[in-house]
Every structure is written in structure tokens, then in C-alpha cells.
Image (cartoon, rainbow, N blue to C red):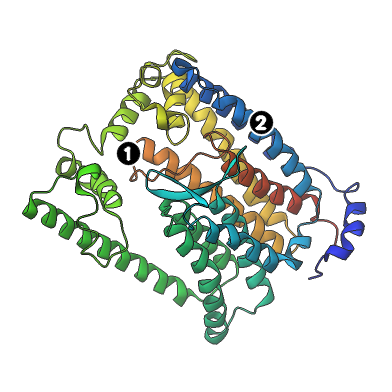
């Protein structure tokens, strides 16, 4: 395929007047953004929070970013993918330096810029997307030898930022990357043996985590330690070779064996229990905007109601009808992303559109599923609805890339 270099950019701009816009995704994204602002406001109504104003500002900036990226031929990014990757790794390294990264609740995930707290893991998603697509485009995938060579390069390119993200620690941002990469590998027609090996490795990983969780319970009970995160202070993790923190083990056990870690339901399982009550109390049509009691009275903790658990607030105030409406808008975004991936005239466009769509799919599924108890609580936010500046901007940038794939799909045969 023909690469677009920075020197060719003026020529790229000339083609934008001939390109058509896809209206489906922007329509859905505007709807989701309006839901987000409205329910961030509602979730913080009792404390008169102003995060809805900040979210609105982020969305306006993100809209400009979305349009700007859409106007650039997506093939332009292939020519500088490695530079973008290298640039994105710098803040991932800087955030781990004491004094540079801001520590909040024991994690160093943000760099305080004064007017804005920047989260480097969000730019890492974009970097991993582009470097994966670039690697798959520039290398042949066919024979076992060729496949192993490509997988080796991707293991280094994807594994390095994942390791840096896990060191923060930020498990939620790390676990969304593998599904995106695997989907891009799948359409590259990698050998079926790879997927069999990957499935085997995944089953082995689940087995190791289950065995480690069992040992954790025995260790805590044998020593009479409390499962409370403030009291145990990582007593078991210092003795285990499995790279998990004890609070992460608690979250796993809160999902599979809540009566073990929190028999009274007032500790690690409290947020989930309140989320289930919040969702269930909405009924068919909900209690009405700003009329929900769970978030207003603080039963659903105010620190999480406007971000990780905002879907619960929507479910309480708009009920099943409102929840289905939100999921329907996400469905439009996801199905349209797959449609655009199919319309792309080259592999790079297909990989970009599919990778972004799968990334969003993981975010939506895990966030909604954790609010209703289908998966362990991970803190993965809901795109365009959960509060968060860096997350909003990265979502806009990624969707801008998908729009670019649609707009420039007919610029070459």
C-alpha cells in the first residue's frame, strides 16, 4: 500500500473536500456524551459537584480532536507509527518517577499538569493500536517461522507498555489491550495453532490465579488476618510469586466467594451490592432524572457514582428503558465500526477500525457487566459517559481514526 508521509500532507488535505462523512457514529457519540454530562450532574447533585462542567469542556476539546483526526488520511499515521509509539512511552516512564507521577490511593497513574491531570495509559492505547497495525502491515504472516517473527515483535511492542501500566499499578488499562491486539491478529489470518496455544495459555493463567486465590484464603485464615485492605497491607503478596496485589485478590474473591472475604457485605463487596440495588430499583422507566436515591444519599459511593458506576445511576433514574437506550447507542457505534472495517480498501484501515471497535466493546461489556455482578469489579470506565478527561480525549481520537478510515476509503483502488 502507499504510505502517506508528513511531506505529502498538503496533498492529503486536498482530498478531504471530496471525502464523505459517516453520520451514524457521530450521532451516537453525541447522544452518549449528552447522557454522560446529564448523569454526572445528577450523580453529584447532592454535593453540588462541578465535574459535569469539566466533562463538557473535555467533550468540546475532544470534538475538535475528533474532527481534526478525521480530516487526516489514516495512512498518514502508518508512516510515523513508530515515532508515535516512542513518544507515548515517555510519559509512561515519567509517571513512575516519584514526584512526577501523582500518587492517588497507592497508584501513580497521573501526571499533574496544573490545569489537567494527564493519564499516560490512555495514549498508550493509541500507540499500541498503531504499532500493532504497522507491524502486521509491514511483515508477512503465513508460515510458522513468519508468524513467530511477527509475534515476537508484537510481544515486545505490546508487552513493554503493558508492563509499565501494571507497575503503576493500573490493571484495568492493561487488560483492555490484549483483546484489541488479538482481534487484529485474527483478521491477519494468523495460524490456528497460535490461537490454540493462546487459549491454552489463558486456561493456564486462570488456573494459576485460582490456585493463588486458594492459597491466599488459606494463608489469611491460618494467620487470623483480616481481608480488609487497610489492615492486611499486602501480607500475602510479599510471599507470592504471582504478580497480584492483595486488594486485587480481594476483588476476585468478592466475585467468586463474597461470603469468604466480606460475610457482612460492608467491605469489599459493598460497592457491588449497592450497585445491584441501584440498578434493580430503577424498574422499567426509572425514578426520574435527579430523583435517584442511591447516589443522592451516598449509598452508592459518591467517589465512584459519576465515573465507574455511572451506568448504575442511569439504570436507577431512567430504568430499563434508559439502560437499553444507552446500550442501543453503543450498539450503533460498535456495529458501525465493524461495518467501516469491512468497507476499508486496505488492511491498515481494516485493522484500525476493528481494533478501535473491539477496544470499545471491551470497555462497554466489562463496565456494564461489573455493575450487575457478571464480572469482577475492575474500574473500567464507560466511553463518553464516565467522567475523565484523558479517557474522553483518547476516545475521541480513536473514533476520529475510524471516521478517517470511512472518509478516505475511496481515495485509492
Q: Residue at x 62, y 51 (%)?
A: 338
* Contact? badges 2 and 1 (CB < 8 Å): no
Residue 205 location (% of width, % of height) = 32, 65
Mark 1: secondary structure: loop
Q: Quadrant of residue 300?
A: top left
The C terminus - image quarter = bottom right
Front-lying residue, 211 or 19: 211
Question: Is residue 259 found left or right of 399 in the rendered image?
Answer: left
Mark 2: secondary structure: helix
CA gap between label 2 and label 1 equals 32 Å
The N terminus - image quarter = bottom right
Front-lying residue, 310 or 334: 310
Q: Quadrant of residue 90?
A: bottom right
Instruction: Give the label, 2 or 1, closer to the camera.
Output: 2
Residue identified by numbered label 1: 373
Q: Quadrant of residue 32?
A: top right
Residue 57, numbered circle: 2
Q: Residues within 10 Å of mark 2 (few under 14, many from 20)?
A: few
Question: Is residue 173 found left or right of 86 in the rendered image?
Answer: left
Q: Residue at x 18, y 45 (%)?
A: 227
Q: Which of pointers 2 and 1 lies earlier in the amino acid sequence?
A: 2
**Count of numbered circles in the view:** 2
Q: Is residue 342 above or below residue 346?
A: above
Residue 174 location (% of width, % of height) = 46, 56
Q: Residue at x 83, y 56 (%)?
A: 410
Query: Does residue 111 appear anywhere in the picture?
Result: yes
Query: Does residue 22 appear anywhere in the picture?
Result: no
Front-lying residue, 190 or 68: 68
Residue 375 location (% of width, % of height) = 34, 45
Amino acid at each position: 500500500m502507499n504510505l502517506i508521509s508528513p511531506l505529502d500532507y498538503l496533498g492529503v488535505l486536498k482530498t478531504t473536500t471530496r471525502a464523505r462523512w459517516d453520520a451514524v457514529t457521530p450521532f451516537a457519540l453525541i447522544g452518549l456524551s449528552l447522557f454522560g454530562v446529564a448523569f454526572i450532574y445528577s450523580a453529584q447533585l447532592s454535593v453540588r459537584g462541578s465535574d459535569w462542567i469539566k466533562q463538557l469542556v473535555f467533550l468540546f476539546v475532544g470534538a475538535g480532536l475528533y474532527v481534526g483526526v478525521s480530516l487526516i488520511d489514516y495512512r498518514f499515521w502508518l508512516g510515523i507509527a513508530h515515532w508515535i509509539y516512542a513518544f507515548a512511552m515517555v510519559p509512561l516512564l515519567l509517571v513512575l518517577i516519584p514526584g512526577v507521577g501523582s500518587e492517588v490511593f497507592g497508584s501513580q497513574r497521573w501526571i499533574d499538569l496544573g490545569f489537567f491531570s494527564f493519564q499516560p495509559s490512555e495514549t498508550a492505547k493509541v500507540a499500541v493500536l498503531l504499532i500493532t497495525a504497522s507491524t502486521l502491515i509491514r511483515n508477512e504472516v503465513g508460515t510458522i517461522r513468519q508468524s513467530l517473527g511477527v509475534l515476537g515483535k508484537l510481544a515486545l511492542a505490546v508487552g513493554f507498555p503493558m508492563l509499565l501500566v501494571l507497575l503503576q499499578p493500573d490493571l484495568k488499562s492493561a487488560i483492555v489491550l490484549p483483546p484489541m491486539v488479538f482481534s487484529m491478529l485474527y483478521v491477519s489470518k494468523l495460524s490456528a495453532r497460535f490461537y490454540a496455544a493462546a487459549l491454552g495459555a489463558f486456561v493456564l493463567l486462570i488456573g494459576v490465579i485460582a490456585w493463588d486465590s486458594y492459597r491466599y484464603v488459606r494463608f489469611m485464615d491460618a494467620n487470623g488476618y483480616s481481608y480488609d485492605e487497610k489492615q492486611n497491607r499486602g501480607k500475602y503478596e510479599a510471599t507470592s510469586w504471582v504478580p497480584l496485589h492483595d486488594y486485587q485478590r480481594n476483588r476476585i474473591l468478592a466475585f467468586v466467594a463474597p461470603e469468604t472475604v466480606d460475610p457482612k457485605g460492608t467491605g469489599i463487596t459493598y460497592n457491588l451490592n449497592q450497585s445491584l440495588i441501584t440498578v434493580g430499583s430503577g424498574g422499567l422507566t426509572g425514578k426520574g432524572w435527579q430523583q435517584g436515591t442511591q447516589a443522592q444519599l451516598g449509598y452508592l459511593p459518591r467517589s465512584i457514582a459519576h465515573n465507574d458506576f455511572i451506568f448504575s445511576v442511569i439504570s436507577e433514574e431512567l430504568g430499563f428503558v434508559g439502560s437499553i437506550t444507552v446500550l442501543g447507542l453503543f450498539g450503533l457505534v460498535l456495529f458501525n465500526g465493524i461495518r467501516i472495517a469491512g468497507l476499508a480498501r486496505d488492511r491498515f484501515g481494516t485493522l484500525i477500525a476493528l481494533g478501535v471497535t473491539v477496544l470499545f466493546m471491551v470497555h462497554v461489556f466489562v463496565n456494564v457487566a461489573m455493575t450487575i455482578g457478571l464480572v469482577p469489579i475492575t474500574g473500567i470506565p464507560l466511553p463518553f459517559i464516565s467522567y475523565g478527561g484523558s479517557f474522553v480525549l483518547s476516545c475521541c481520537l480513536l473514533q476520529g481514526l475510524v471516521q478517517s478510515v470511512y472518509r478516505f476509503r475511496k481515495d485509492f483502488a
